[in-house]
Amino acid sequence: MTYWLQITAGRGPAECAWTVTRVLREIIDDAEKRGVKTEVLKTMPGPFAGTLSSALISVNGGRSRDLMANWLGTVQWIATSPFRPSYKRRNWFVGIEAIAVPEVPAWHEREISFETMRASGPGGQNVNKVESAVRVTHLPSGISATAREERSQSANRKLALARLAEQLDARGKANERAAQQQGWSQHNSLERGNPVKVFEGPQFKLRKENRDA
């Protein structure tokens, strides 16, 4: 099963964006050790070269759930700012959240219900005496589409299926936009406390972790 993980600096400064880059690298390394496949789906550049405001990655196979359990939450980096050496703040935080993978509107013939109807023209006049109009319904979702323009039932069947596929595709895109919106909301909900992992220094060495899988 595939999962999405988002690493975000929230509204934090460049130091947090630098931390996102290092955390992304650590997660990919951890995934390799666990036999989990990863793919970087999208990144948002940070204010300086080598920094990322956020990164979205997919994880699949192996011990994916163990990987997520080991990283979900807040990660803290303790170090002097590489961009503002005289700045007194030394604690920087990033958040890691799981995002539901949007449903892909894939369907099979066995999930489709076909209904034939008699096509009618203006004023109720029958276009033909056979049931050439077709309504198709995607049973899992309840979405349906109808075609009655063609004289042939076979042609209307193909047209109705094409319209159904278009509706399912639109639903899939809407789900994807919803997932992206969920990702954006994570930028504003970063919890700066109770970190699951704490790294320290310019070498980004692991200092402490509050849970491990």
Image: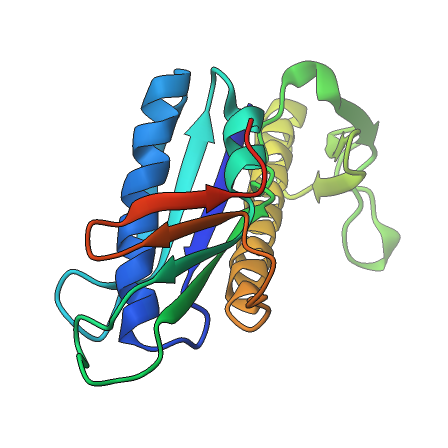
Q: Residue at x 71, y 42 (%)?
A: 145
Would residue 118 be found to the left or right of residue 27 on screen?
Answer: right
Q: Is there any visible trace of residue 44 in the rendered image? A: no
Q: Residue at x 39, y 46 (%)?
A: 207
Q: Nearer the viewer, residue 156 or 112?
A: 112
Q: Where on the picture, by quarter, is residue 7?
A: bottom left
Point out the image quarter for the C terminus: top right
Q: Position of residue 159 (x, y in %)?
A: 58, 36
Q: Where on the picture, by quarter, is residue 168?
A: top right
Q: Residue at x 17, y 70 (%)?
A: 82
In this view, the residue farthest toward the right is: 124
Q: Residue at x 77, y 24 (%)?
A: 114
102 to 112, vertically: above or below = below
Q: Is there any visible trace of residue 53 in the rendered image? A: yes
63 to 10, vertically: above or below = above
Point out the image quarter for the N terminus: top right
Q: Nearer the viewer, residue 22 or 208?
A: 208
Q: Nearer the viewer, residue 113 or 130?
A: 113
> Looking at the image, how many numbered discs can be counted on the residues?
0
Q: Where on the picture, by quarter, is residue 107?
A: top right
Would residue 25 be found to the left or right of residue 170 on screen?
Answer: left
Q: Position of residue 149 (x, y in %)?
A: 64, 44
Q: Position of residue 119 (x, y in %)?
A: 78, 40
Q: Position of residue 77 (x, y in %)?
A: 37, 59
Q: Nearer the viewer, residue 158 or 132?
A: 158
* Colour theme: rainbow
Would residue 88 be found to the left or right of residue 34 on screen?
Answer: left
